[in-house]
Amino acid sequence: MDGLPEDHIARCWWEGRLPALSSDGDWPQIPTAGNFDAKRNAVGREIHHGPLLVNRLKAQYAEAQLAHPIRLRDLSDPQSRTVTTGHQLCLAGGPAFTFYKIQTAITLAQRLQERWKTPVVPVFWLASEDHDFDEVRSLWNGAQWQTWHPEPQEGGAVGRMSTRGLAGELQTWASALELSGSGADGLKFPEDSTMSQAMRHWVHAMFGPEHVVVIDGDDAGLKATFIETMQREVRESLTDQAVSSCNSVLEAAGFKPQVHVRPCNLFHLVPGGRHRLTSSGQMWQSLGGAKWEGAEALCQNIAAHPEEFSPNALLRPVYQAQLLPDVAMVGGLAEVAYGMQLPGVFARLGMEQPVLVPRDSVVVLSKRWSNATTKAGVTDAALLESKATWIQGVVNQAEAPNAEDWRLSVQEQAAKASEALVHVDRSLEGSVNATLAKMENLLDRLEQQTVKAIKRKEAEAMSRLDRLDGWVRPNGKPQERICSFFHLASEWQQQAEEGETLDKVLAQASLRGHEAADWSPLVHVIRSGPH
């Protein structure tokens, strides 16, 4: 958190500098052992859906042609708690930060389970009802984005889409990256899978069957638990009122709310479409054309067919927390920010908002890239800085004459000359200043020429830094936001000692970094080879 700007909403929340809420609820709690303990007890007073969860998840895993995960049975225990994270259904599991979110949840769940001596289950929530396919259809192949163009292209909830043609697309991508055999195998899924089912396979390919439970909320049985809340959303504009009140506090403090709240924050799901619900007078309609004669008619439809309705990004965390015994929600900074908008919604529903836990970040350096940082003299701390800073380090090591010392000397002599010459003729002061400006310009030019000369002389080092930057910041962005975990794991495995897999190394680093239930997000630099 210390690396964020002072006025970043997440840092202000973390440091307790947000203004007090003027209406319902309190700001989400930060992840401390005491807050987790209190949340554990409070969640225990809410409705327990364990048997329903186990029953529906067994069906979901069977439909995906996967064995039940080992932790699934723990959800039936009323003493169990969950740590949840989630993400959109990106191809091949998405950018590597999806893996890091799940690993953060797994590590936190383990530490809390050790503390409480009762089950704490890490859960990955499939954001299967999101309908923005363009956000999830591309993969970085090491040089450019490779985009999947399914034929025919379906609309609506991405999780319901067919994966027809995707296996071939992933094979092309794997070949471009020269993925190892096990890496390519991890991309496989049954031929008749939906996108939601394929994502479930990818998550378990990354983590195995024993560490995480994957939930798809697009399920009629699970949605039945959310009927009353969806009906209140229609009848009372529940989310709009509560979030708008919270937003006004944030905006008055200079923060821009992360998610736009609407009068109704539900969608209508139909084959090939996911459409917002709106009202006009007594009439309700979806932007897809469905109509209802008043709010009660719509509420009756929700009760009869809850699977046809879908919460938006603001209501989805409420659905999760209503269904699961959640003590914590793991997310990135954007998810933490929209968690700031929800205290009033949880308060009005009489629910506990889970503790917000910012995820860890990771930079992965396989053996060849670890060697490259050693040769370049780039430390773990410097690795997170810009390439320009690395280059400046090379320039500084060249021990070229310090132009700044010359500049100070010239300025000192100019000041003395000006003081002496004004006694002769005050008009000479302008000539001294003009001469000084010319000399400073010449020094600037000399400094630039010196840097260019050093870069020419150190051409090999400059090239090494360019390549390293391309690995750490592919396409100009952090590695974890561009590269797939399967890509990083394959690169690691091809150069590592036998049995040293990236998933195991990351799990060990996460546990070492978080030795207690008090939690602060970390940046891990994971190296293979010399440190």
Image (spheres, rainbow, N blue to C red):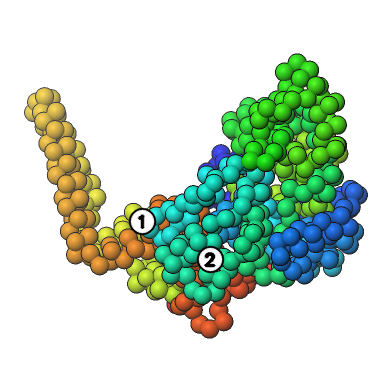
322 on left or right of 4: right
Task: Give the residue at mark 2.
Answer: 486
Numbered disc 1: secondary structure: helix
* 54 over 355 or under it: above or below: below
Residue 190, image x, y percentages = 64, 64
The kind of residue on which mark 1 rests is: Lys
- Local packing at callout 2 (Cα closer than 10 Å; few below 14, some 14-19, many 20+) is many
The residue most toward the top is 281
Residue 282 point in image, percent of width and height:
78, 17
Amino acid type of the residue tagged 2 in the rendering: Phe
Along the viewing direction, whichever of 87 and 361 lies nearer the viewer: 87
**What label does residue 159 carry, if any?**
none
Quadrant hosting residue 257: top right
Name the residue: 19% across, 64% down: 457
The label shown at residue 387 is 1
- Cα–Cα span, label 2 and label 1: 26 Å
Could you tell me which residue is drawn at 35 percent across and 59 percent down?
A: 390
> Please, what secondary structure does the residue beneath circle 2 have?
helix
| 75 relative position to 183: left or right | right
